[in-house]
Amino acid sequence: MQDLTLYELLAQAGWTVVPIYLCSVFAVAIGVRKYFDFRAAGLDDTAWLEPTLHALQAGDHNAALEAATRSRHPAAAVTRGLVRALVKRPEHAEAEAKRIGMEELQRLGRYTRSLALLAEIAPLLGLLGTVVGMVDLFMGIQGSQHGNVEMAQLSAGIWKALLTTAAGLTVAVPTLALHAYFRSQLDRLRVQLTGVVQRVMFVAPGRLS
């Protein structure tokens, strides 16, 4: 047993680790997808905000829209919608900003709940595999002649059963960490959106008629 690799050990656990393998594949796929989504969102890009605010202070909403269009930041999309609303229907400006902000948060937050679900399912599947393995082991003991079982055979059955629990936890821990990271990014974006809307509303009223 000492010469076996981790892959070979898991292979000996049988079909019970297959669902855990699938959980790991889905977790990696979602993690990669969300990484590129957040990278494309450019949450660190704030260079567009000051030119936008300066244009609003000058009462030039076209220049403000142009400055906000240069960024992929979700707050820039909210700002564009807010400026348009301030020009056409000022009484609905905050509601429009809230609507667009929720859409942006929902778009970036897509699939993050799936990571939390996978982090919960993987250890449960591991525990299920362990229980099934222990049941199989004791059924084998019961069916053996006179119930005599060598210690080596018993220990081999136990560690094979416990492998599924180890595999489930191995998938769950990094998946949960990924979920926590992406949630923190969403919280960061939520704070940014609130701050941008407040700053735009502070400089814009009475200037974009």
Image (cartoon, grey):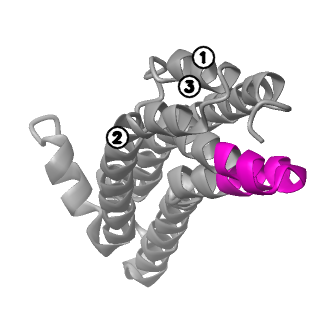
Is residue 9 left or right of 53 when viewed as pictured?
left
Return the x and y of residue 9 as percentages of the image width and height.
22, 50
Point out the residue furthest to the left here.
3
Tell me: residue 14, above or below residue 157.
below
Q: Main secondary structure of the magenta part?
A: helix
Q: Are marks 1 and 3 in contact (CB under 8 Å)?
A: yes
Spatial CA distance of label 2 from label 1 is 26 Å
Return the x and y of residue 192 as percentages of the image width and height.
66, 27
What residue did someone put label 2 on? Answer: 40
What residue did someone put label 1 on? Answer: 54
Residue 52's tag is: 3
Spatial CA distance of label 3 from label 2 is 21 Å
> Which of the pair 206/116 is nearer the observer?
206
Query: Amino acid type of disc 3?
Result: Thr
Query: Disc 2 on helix, strand or loop?
Result: helix
Image quadrant for the C terminus? top right
Label 1 crowd (10 A; few <14 / some 14-19 / many >=20): some
Residue span colored magenta: 83-102
Q: Quadrant of residue 146?
A: bottom left
Q: Earlier in the sequence, mark 2 or mark 1?
A: 2
Query: Disc 1 on helix, strand or loop?
Result: helix
Return the x and y of residue 68 as percentages of the image width and height.
49, 35
Query: Disc 3 on helix, strand or loop?
Result: helix
Q: Earlier in the sequence, mark 3 or mark 2?
A: 2
The residue lying at 51 percent from left, 65 percent from top is 125
Query: Amino acid type of disc 1?
Result: His
Label 2 crowd (10 A; few <14 / some 14-19 / many >=20): few
Is residue 182 left or right of 136 when viewed as pictured?
right
